[in-house]
Image (cartoon, helix red, strand yellow):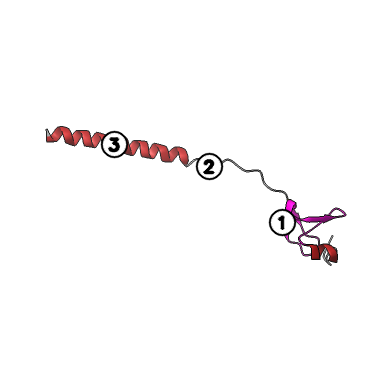
């Protein structure tokens, strides 16, 4: 009787481990790629920031209102 209980417990443990590792393998797949937010460079200081957070004037991008008012920086191409 003890042998039978031992084998039942051993088989149950094996099935439990198999399911656990199988579940982990399926959840470890890489996450789907998210679309990248377009980045722009501030014409004054050169900081890169998302385009939706930048301010634009005459096809130039700025990181803040202060830099927008100052205009392009000395190193602007």
Question: Which residue position is annotated with label 1?
Answer: 49
Q: Residue at x 74, y 51 (%)?
A: 52
> The magenta stretch spans which residues?
40-64
Q: What crowding class fits label 3: few (fewer than 14 Cα within 10 Å), some (14-19), or many (20 or more)?
A: few
Q: Residue at x 41, y 38 (%)?
A: 23
> Between disc 1 and disc 2, whose residue precedes?
2
* Mark seen at residue 25: none
Question: Which residue position is annotated with label 2?
Answer: 30
> Between disc 3 and disc 2, whose residue precedes?
3
Drawn side of residue 27 relative to residue 63, left or right = left
* Quarter-of-image position of residue 35: top right
Asked if labels 1 and 3 touch by Cβ distance under 8 angstroms, the answer is no
Q: CA distance from mark 3 to mark 2?
A: 27 Å
Q: Quadrant of the N terminus?
A: top left
Residue 10, image x, y percentages = 23, 37
Between tags 1 and 2, which lies in front?
1
Drawn side of residue 8 relative to residue 38, left or right = left
Residue 61 against residue 45 in the figure, above or below: above
Q: What crowding class fits label 2: few (fewer than 14 Cα within 10 Å), some (14-19), or many (20 or more)?
A: few
Asked if labels 2 and 1 touch by Cβ distance under 8 angstroms, the answer is no
* Quarter-of-image position of residue 46: bottom right
Question: Which residue position is annotated with label 3?
Answer: 14
């Amino acid at each position: 009787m003890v042998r039978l209980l031992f084998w039942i417990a051993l088989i149950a443990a094996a099935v439990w481990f198999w399911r656990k590792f199988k579940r982990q393998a399926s959840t470890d797949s890489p996450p789907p790629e998210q679309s990248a937010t377009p980045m722009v460079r501030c014409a004054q200081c050169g900081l890169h920031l998302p385009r939706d957070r930048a301010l634009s004037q005459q096809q130039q991008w700025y990181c803040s209102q202060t830099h927008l008012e100052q205009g392009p920086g000395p190193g602007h191409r």
